[in-house]
Image (cartoon, rainbow, N blue to C red):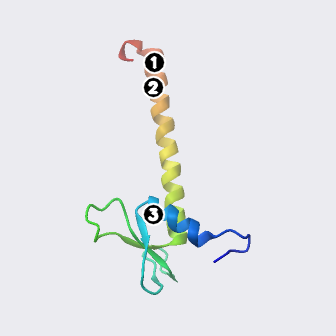
């Protein structure tokens, strides 16, 4: 299924979602747990230890979650690097 700009969003997105621990649901579209809209859903979540537990989210909500996770990861990496720079300049014996 192609979008207006010619990309294959469904194919590419489902592979991206799998990397985040979400698989496409095999049943008909249902209500997303986050936005409450009826859309095709993906199930999973790495935050759960049991594979039978997780979230049912649509692609739009997963895109938002993935973007937020990437932003948080970049922020934390910046904070860690800042701490390393601080330690290197003020406490070289710790390095």
Assess whether mark 2 and mark 1 are in contact (beta carbons under 8 angstroms): yes
Residue 50: % across, % down: 25, 65
As drawn, 38 above or below 21: below
Residue 4: % across, % down: 73, 74
Assess whether mark 2 and mark 3 are in contact (beta carbons under 8 angstroms): no
Furthest residue toward bottom = 28
Does label 1 or label 3 sit earlier along the sequence?
3
Q: Quadrant of residue 44?
A: bottom left
Which structural element holds mark 3?
Answer: helix
Question: Label 2: which residue?
Answer: 84
Q: Is residue 6 left or right of residue 44?
A: right
Number of marks in picture: 3
Q: Nearer the viewer, mark 1 or mark 3?
A: 3
As drawn, 86 above or below 51: above
Q: Residue at coordinates 38% horizontally, 71% vertically from top-left?
A: 55
Q: Which mark is residue 18?
A: 3
Question: Label 1: which residue?
Answer: 88
In three-dimensional space, the C-alpha distance between marks 1 and 2, rounded to whole angstroms, equals 6 Å
């Amino acid at each position: 299924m192609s979008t207006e700009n010619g990309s294959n969003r469904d194919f590419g997105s489902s592979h991206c979602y799998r990397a985040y621990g979400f698989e496409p649901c095999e049943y008909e579209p249902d209500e997303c747990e986050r936005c409450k809209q009826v859309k095709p859903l993906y199930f999973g979540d790495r935050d759960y230890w049991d594979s039978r537990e997780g979230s049912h989210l649509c692609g739009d909500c997963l895109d938002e979650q993935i973007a937020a996770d990437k932003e948080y990861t970049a922020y934390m990496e910046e904070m860690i690097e800042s701490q390393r720079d601080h330690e290197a300049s003020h406490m070289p014996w710790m390095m």
